Image: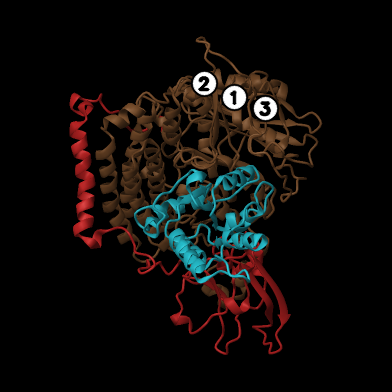
Amino acid sequence: MTRNPSTVNVDQPESSLADRSHLLPIFNGLAVTLRHFLRNLFGQRDVATIQYPEVKRQYSERLRGRHILTTKDDGSLRCVACYMCETVCPADCIHIVAEEDPNATVEWEKKPLVFEIDLLRCVFCGYCVDACPKQALIMSREHEMAFTTRAEAVVGIEQLRQKGPIEEQDLGYRPYY
Amino acid sequence: MTVSSANTELPLRDLLPGGADLKIEEASDGHAVITVDRTRLLGVLEALRDRPELKCNLLADVCGVDYPDREDRFEVVYHLASLEHLHRFRVKVPVAEGDAVVPSAYGVYKAADWFEREAYDMFGIRFEGHPNLKRILTHDAFQGHPLRKDYDPGQRWFLTDAETMVPEWATATSEDDDQFETQVLNLGPSHPATHGTLRTVVRLDGEVITRAECEIGYLHRCFEKMSETHGWQQVIPYTDRLNYCSSMMNGVGYALAAEHMLGVEAPPRAQVVRVILSELSRVMDHCVCLGANLVDLGALTNFWYFFQPREEIYGLLEACAGGRLTVSYARIGGLAHDVPADFVERVRFLLGYIPKFIDDVDKLVTRNRIFRDRTEGVGVISGEEALAWGWTGPCLRASGVPYDVRRAWPYMGYQDYDFEVPVATTGDTYARYLVRMEEMRQSLRIVEQALERLPDGPVITDNHHVALPPKSKVYSEMESLIWHFKLIYEGIKIPAGDGYFFTEGANGELGYYLVSDGGGKPYRIKVRPPCFAVFQTYPHMLVGHMVADSIAIMGSLNIIAGELDR
Amino acid sequence: MRQPDGSSSVLTTKVDAMLGWVRKNSLWPLPFGTACCAIEFMSVVSAHYDLARFGAEVVRFSPRQSDLMIVAGTITDKMAPVVKKIYGQMAEPKYVISMGACACTGGFYRAYHVVQGVDELVPVDVYVPGCPPTPEALMHGVLKLQDMIQRGETHYDRLKREHRASTA
């Protein structure tokens, strides 16, 4: 515990005459902005702007985007409707109704009849992915979703289901360890 | 218990009036807890402030807690700190529901002003002698007191009139000495320079402000009520949205508080990563504060320059946590998952990249005559005045008081890092700008040192009462699956008790007062927002300045509405 | 010039198409930013993403000078009358984008002081999910709104058609 930490005094001295006349600071300031301008003009690769939608920034493979319900090899959902994602969701945006799986094995006893996520309530925190014990719910890198009505944003099993081999999906946040 | 200082080693009882009858105990968070009846409250507070062995110059927080099962239903809790002797105190005053009146501490500590208004708003506890006891966070048509345990979290009240808060002095016409009428002007809440949700009503004599009053609460999102309805771990996304410009720091502060109460410590790797990301978040916050401040003054280019470092830090946070702005990366017990493999290279790149932009803005602004004319001497506040109002953080350090929680009460290993605390003496807007610029450079120094000492190892505790077990084990082992289920369904159980834990947020001392009843959900979380104490001084600082200065001052105080209103 | 059966003539639809093109490429936003989404909106107008490339060059905080209100952030019951007033002060044609979970539905704040979606107060054309939405998500929302303006599918266009139908 320090009651007298080592400090650095940042007070500036009084403005000198050169500063108050403002001529030199004008040139110094213009030098800074002109340097940025010329660098952008002649070195296109340094320009900070990303030309969306032609160029899209590559997000990391941990981005918390739209959810995906993963499937087993035979195409059925891995989800066993255990309600853990619904319980842990801080926004209460997941709605599950469970039903018995007619092809039940010990490991995959139930399946979801209804699995809806209200994407407009979702805060994309990733807790549902952390909570899932079957790696049934993961997130993709898809983050460009815009809707025209609120009802459109409540997505069900058919829209969340994984479409194609998992290696080719644009995967985002999923369990790591 | 004794209170030691340079002069004396006296028991605390002897230093307080009526000390023999007071209930004094030492809490696990290092605070001396004094439970006192309301009739003797002011005497105790004055003794704490005035006695040279105690010298509590900072009133950090005043809040209420509702215990409906007790005979004295409410408890008003005061948190005080002595920056000279480095002691902290907690004073508790129980009051019954039927007679919930407590003498106001405003006469002893001006900092109690808005904190008491909030306790009145949230619980209905009246503070006798308070100059302006009105609702502060909820709107005028709101009925009931929302943080009481019997208040339904979803019960809303609609407000239909946009101009309900009109101060009485604003409607009365007054004339100044020259027989000219003064004018009342409303600044905000939808105004480019008021950062979205702050409203000030000012009385103008020409261009000079003669009186001002602020209204806040336009972003009151009920964080504290939401934390009572969600589990301890589920509160972390809510904490991200408190000070959203540096969201990692809020999560880390909260996780540290919960870890203290649990008696669990995050592994060393998690602590160093938390330090690195917290300091980078501090740089981010100062970038946006200074950028917005300069935009309000007309210097738009610096805003663009400052946003580039922010974008690069976003890239790093997104690679670690999955979210740019609201990261939810901290967990109670450590971090959500390990940093990516290229973490060290990315941070090194940032260390070389960010200083160029700080230097650019420095060249454009620091010696610029226009900027100096607009900010020097504007919004001056002395160190003692600032402390009396409860200021902490860069705004306090710009007034000459070298209080930094990282040095005064170090946490997460800050005592081992070599950095300096920037201090200025003039206490005006220019000083606050200079302090923040230097703090960014010092933060980058800390990041560099932390990067050198980044150890290997796990990033979360292996105590499975607290942290989710690794997924590979959950998929294969029954025991881990059971831990996983228990943690998700029942939540973390923090033993009953309370504690106040604080860190140095980007704006100052960010404190969390946690009260637990042993269950899976917090009983009460009170956030001590640094800009709440700072903003309550703002109407008083404005008097005598011109309207344009009010914008410059507000920008320099870095008022983040998410933190202010919670 | 209207056909006898009330439908638009070729000239009127061409004019509509041109007006749509002009309006969509000169949307001046009013960032009604309250919370974290406002910071992400600041990122969108900054150099890295630059909304100005789509015509939203001038970010005007005055409702009289803007035509797109982007509600970015949580709207509380205290702020609700302000939102309605600002929306009322905007001149037509005006559009609203609701940015972020809090503005769309109240997000995870099912609380006593939070409006559960800004569409309780004003008609919303595009909802952009996310907390906060990434800058690309917001730009995607703006591009979607531009498509809607071109095709005449916004609330304003619907109101205009209803008005025309009722006065025809």
Task: Provide the secondary structure element on which disc 1 rests.
Answer: helix
For this view, does B174 lie left or right of residue B302? right
Q: Are marks 2 and 3 on the same chain?
A: yes
Tell me which amino acid carries mark 3. Leu
Chain letter tied to red = A
Q: Which mark is residue B53?
A: 2
Residue C16: x and y, percent? 50, 64
Q: Which mark is residue B12?
A: 1
Q: Which mark is nearer the camera, 3 or 1?
A: 3
Disc ID at residue A172: none
User: Mark 2 to mark 3: distance in Å?
Assistant: 33 Å
Q: Nearer the viewer, residue B129 or B509?
A: B129
Q: Which residue is mark 3?
A: B133
User: Is tag 3's residue or tag 1's residue first in the polypeptide sequence?
Assistant: 1
Discs 1 and 2 carry the same chain letter: yes
Q: Quadrant of the N terminus of chain A?
A: top left
User: In the image, which lettered chain appears brown?
Assistant: B
Q: What type is the residue that disc 1 sits on? A: Leu
